Amino acid sequence: MRLWPFGRGTAEDEAARQESALQRAELQRLAAANREAELARQAEDLHALSHGGIPVMARKRLAEQAQDPLAIFTSDLSPSELGLLRQHGYRARGLVAGSAMYHVGQPYASSVGDCEVTVLSRAYDNAMDLAVRRMEQEVQLLGAHGVVGVRVGLVRHEWTDQTIEVTVIGTAVEGPAPAPARPWLCDLSVEEWWALHRAGYDPVHLVWGHSAWFVLTTQGDEFAVRSWSNVELGHWSQALGQARIRAMMEVKKRAQAVRAAGVVGVQVSHRLDEVRLSGGEGGVYEREHHNLVMAVIGTAVRSDASRPSQHRAALMMLSLADGRLAPAGVGKADLSIEN
């Protein structure tokens, strides 16, 4: 058994203690520097997000992927869609996305009749605009031409009625020509996009419109619901029409802003929520009223005079998965039979 002498120890022990103290000081310095760098990055992320941008790490990742010719891409396209892209000189660059969590201001509704809840309508439009702008930035950082198959998700969270979540995601593609100044975005499949391209049309941008329409339940509505006869709920039919018209007006305005010739692939959806009025007394405050949110989205297209307007008929393929007919993206002359 070795006995250690009392006191400060040998010179080697003192040197080891000093070395250990220096290492601890260096680790503390590095930890403090990392904390400062992380706080600076978070502050830069918040500044970018507040101006409609994307986080620092996302920009760095996309820039590195754009510079690497052998970078592995991710895609939500089917094998046939990827094959069609490659056949015509295009390639997938990767999944791109944009998202926004948006706070809704205080909405107000009339207690005497139906009306549009403009605060909620504009909230949906603004949140969608932020998400799409962030997707555009990702496309530009990748050096891609546009995005196909854009999917849009709109969520009103149950844990708060004043928050909207919007997410857009699709596959960025790159073509043989130089990338345009502003990437095009479309919610069409590759087959549909290529059929448009052959017909002399090009996608320009996604266009959308939302209308939040407050439906005030009347005593007549209650009588109609309780009726023993078949009867149209005229009040509801009118509300659906009004909300759809206002949403389509926003779509048309956005299409005109990008100088489009028209809009294709239009999808219409709506959401219905029960609401109660507050701040008064009487029968109108005792009934359950409804808030109807109409969402319309499509792809704005522009004709290209340099390409002929006539094109070969696309071959329609029957899907064994869902039984639907869809264009295969090839003409009869493109078909070959392997023996």
Image (cartoon, helix red, strand yellow):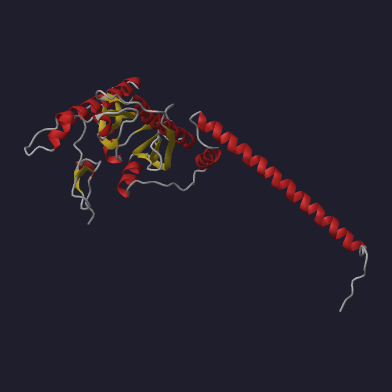
Position of residue 230 in the picture relative to residue 10 (left or right): left
The residue lying toward the viewer, choosing from 231 and 45, is: 231
Spot occupied by residue 274 in the image (x, y as percentages of width and height): 28, 37
Spot occupied by residue 272 in the image (x, y as percentages of width and height): 27, 37
Q: Can residue 303 be seen here?
A: no
Q: Does residue 11 sit above or below 72 in this rendering?
A: below
Position of residue 115 in the picture relative to residue 134 (left or right): left
Residue at (42%, 43%) from the top-left corner?
Answer: 95
Position of residue 145 in the picture relative to residue 5 (left or right): left
Residue at (89%, 60%) from the top-left corner?
Answer: 14
Position of residue 36 in the picture relative to residue 248 (left or right): right
Q: Does residue 74 sit above or below 292 in this rendering?
A: below
Spot occupied by residue 190 in the image (x, y as percentages of width and height): 30, 40
Q: Can residue 138 be seen here?
A: yes
Quadrant of res 296 = top left
Residue at (49%, 43%) from the top-left corner?
Answer: 69
Spot occupied by residue 277 in the image (x, y as percentages of width and height): 31, 31
- Quadrant containing the N terminus in the rendered view: bottom right
Quadrant of res 44 = top right
Residue at (63%, 37%) from the top-left corner?
Answer: 40
